[in-house]
């Protein structure tokens, strides 16, 4: 009985240890997922993009409808973004690729990240699901010179 309880305690402690990655490891993993998004786009690499995104991703931007002059919310899914990435032809040279990652907040299994790219800024909601960080929501805006 004592051996069984001791074994159970070791297993529980081990699971807790695995689940509790240090802050540096978490930040590195969160930054990596944001960079997979950016580099996937710049390199036209759908595998990197797919690795970064949760299948239920919702990427949104507020745009002005040119016909009605009213603002509207445009949506993009993970599948659409991966397809755009695959078809991308105009890849900037590595020295021209802006991909500045700022982790704004991390709490438990969630994080908020700012990703500054050449022509726009993404605000990412990232979640740790089954031990992997994935981008689940993005709200983005074109930079003023690109509007």
Image (spheres, rainbow, N blue to C red):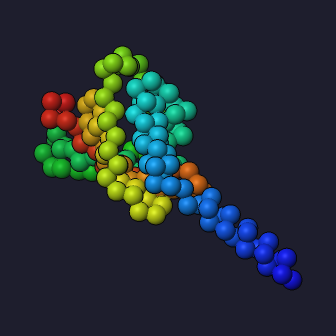
Q: Relative to residue 126, is residue 121 depicted above or below?
A: above
Closer-to-camera residue (19/142): 19
Q: Quadrant where the C terminus lies?
A: top left
- At 33% from the left and 24% from the top, the residue drawn is 97
Q: Quadrant where the N terminus lies?
A: bottom right
Q: Could you say where residue 116 lies in the image, as x and y percent from the top left?
A: 29, 37
- At 15% from the left and 49% from the top, the residue drawn is 70
- Is residue 29 rendered to the left or right of residue 139? right
Closer-to-camera residue (104/129): 104
Q: Is residue 78 visible?
A: no
Kindly give the residue lying farthest to the bottom in the view shown: 1
Q: Is residue 6 visible?
A: yes
Q: Relative to residue 32, is residue 1 depicted above or below?
A: below
Q: Could you say where residue 45 lies in the image, as x and y percent from the top left?
A: 50, 27
**Label tally:** 0
Closer-to-camera residue (88/6): 6
- At 62% from the left and 62% from the top, the residue drawn is 17
């Amino acid at each position: 009985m004592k051996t069984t309880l001791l074994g159970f305690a070791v297993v529980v402690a081990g699971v807790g240890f695995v689940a509790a990655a240090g802050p540096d490891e978490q930040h590195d993993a969160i930054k990596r997922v944001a960079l997979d998004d950016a580099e996937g786009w710049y390199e036209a690499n759908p595998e990197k993009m797919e690795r970064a995104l949760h299948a239920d991703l919702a990427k949104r931007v507020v745009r002005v409808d040119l016909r009605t002059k009213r603002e509207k919310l445009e949506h993009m899914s993970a599948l659409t973004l991966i397809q755009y990435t695959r078809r991308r032809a105009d890849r900037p040279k590595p020295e021209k690729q802006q991909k500045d990652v700022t982790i704004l907040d991390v709490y438990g299994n969630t994080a908020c990240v700012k990703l500054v790219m050449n022509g726009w800024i993404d605000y990412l909601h990232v979640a740790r699901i089954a031990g992997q960080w994935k981008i689940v929501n993005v709200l983005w805006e074109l930079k003023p010179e690109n509007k």
